[in-house]
Image (spheres, grey):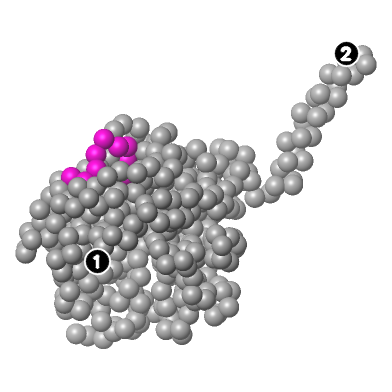
Amino acid sequence: MPAALRLSILVVLLTLIPLITWFLLPQVPHLRSPAEIFSGGKKYPASPLEFDYVQAGSDFGGYPLITNVQVLDFDGDGINEILACDASKNSVSLFSLLPQTKWKEQVIISDVAVPAHATCVDIDLDGDLDVIVSELGNIQPDDGIIGRVELFEKKGEKFVRHLLLDHVRRVADVQSGDFDKDGDIDLAVAVFGHNRGEVLWLENQGNFKFQKHELLVAPGTIHVPVADYDLDGDLDIAAIVTQDEEELWGFENLGNGQFKKRKIWMTINLDFGGAGLVKADLDQDGDQDLILPAGDNLEDRDAYPQAYHGCYWFENKGDWNFEITKISDLGGTYAADVGDLDADGDLDLVLVSMTNDWNTPGTASVVWLENDGQQNFTTWQIASEPIHLTTVAVGDLDGDQKADIVAGSMNLLKPFQRLGRVSAWINGPQEEK
């Protein structure tokens, strides 16, 4: 074959192969996609439920960096509070609701190196909640040995600090459970790192000492929700890995401290942007499913919505098989939580967005997905501001038995406007109190 013909065939192949790949895989865009194929912002129909917006944490002190919010009854008085991790102030705060929908903030833990998550558990089994803080050490990408896990043991009105794990890279999450069935509380740890990371479980040795066991070596692990996913009577671990690869892992508890790792799902789209992982029995069939928000493209300083952003439901089909269904297309989805917002007996979802098209007025920052009872979802818009929301939790904040919403803002990217810190949406028309 003449050299000129071979060259012509090569040129044609080099031209056609990327085009054919693009048309065959429309949901897998090129890395660093150009602006003209961004999907743009989107508005949804207004929520049929009424919500009263309040700013729980108004002490901004610059651009707030809230990494995690939770709704829980921390002090055991029967009334829920908000627990929030503030990476700009290196602290963990508790917010209590006062009359006239006012909020009181109490800093309960300070001097923690960029807290990513606070896990409340009675680690010493003395009847009150202790706090385990997952520390990044740096909010920006960093492969240094700067991560830590610290326990703050509750002693009356004070907390006693214990270092549980150091000499690791950035720690994003810690979850608790008795994995070896010896009667004490062990820990699952997500070491996010940057180019290097891992999934660990820490075996409780007593007296606040823990032995480290490695489950997986992979960078970018965000969350490690704990549940009995295979219904065999012991606690397993799930993990979402989002850095070099985009993968969902399960760690099956075999007993005696042994785990079998299982790759549940992966995608060849390295820009997918997995942003977290939530366990929930969404279809209420008796086993734990997994909810995956996708839209974390913080590595792109001009991040916009993409066609594959949104929320994915991994339905637990048994025997470590999970069936994936996309249930939302909210651009820049960064966090999800589950609750029965309309009090009809099934589980709905709330999603928040970090990197939506904030230059288009009215673009959604908070939505809820109404479940019709058959896991068909209708998307309703709750709010278009504040923007840059990275964490959300659902729970009853005002004691009226309705599911309310709280979210936190992490203002790392432009535009630096429509700012929030800790925001709440109270479900239902509000009466004067």
Question: Mark 1 — residue?
Answer: 82
All told, the count of numbered labels is: 2
Picture layout, residue 391 above or below residue 13: below
307 in magenta: no
Identified by mark 2, the residue type is Ala
User: Residue 178 location, x and y as percent?
Assistant: 31, 60
User: Residue 208 location, x and y as percent?
Assistant: 17, 51
The answer to whether mark 2 and mark 1 are in CB contact below 8 A is: no
User: Residue 354 location, x and y as percent?
Assistant: 42, 53
Residue at the farthest right position:
1
Instruction: State the SS at label 1.
Output: strand
Q: What stretch is highlighted in magenta?
A: 163-172
Of residues 341 and 317, the one nearer the viewer is: 317
CA neighbours of label 1 inside 10 A, class few (<14), some (14 to 19), many (20+): many
* Res. 44 visible in picture: yes
Question: Mark 2 — residue?
Answer: 3
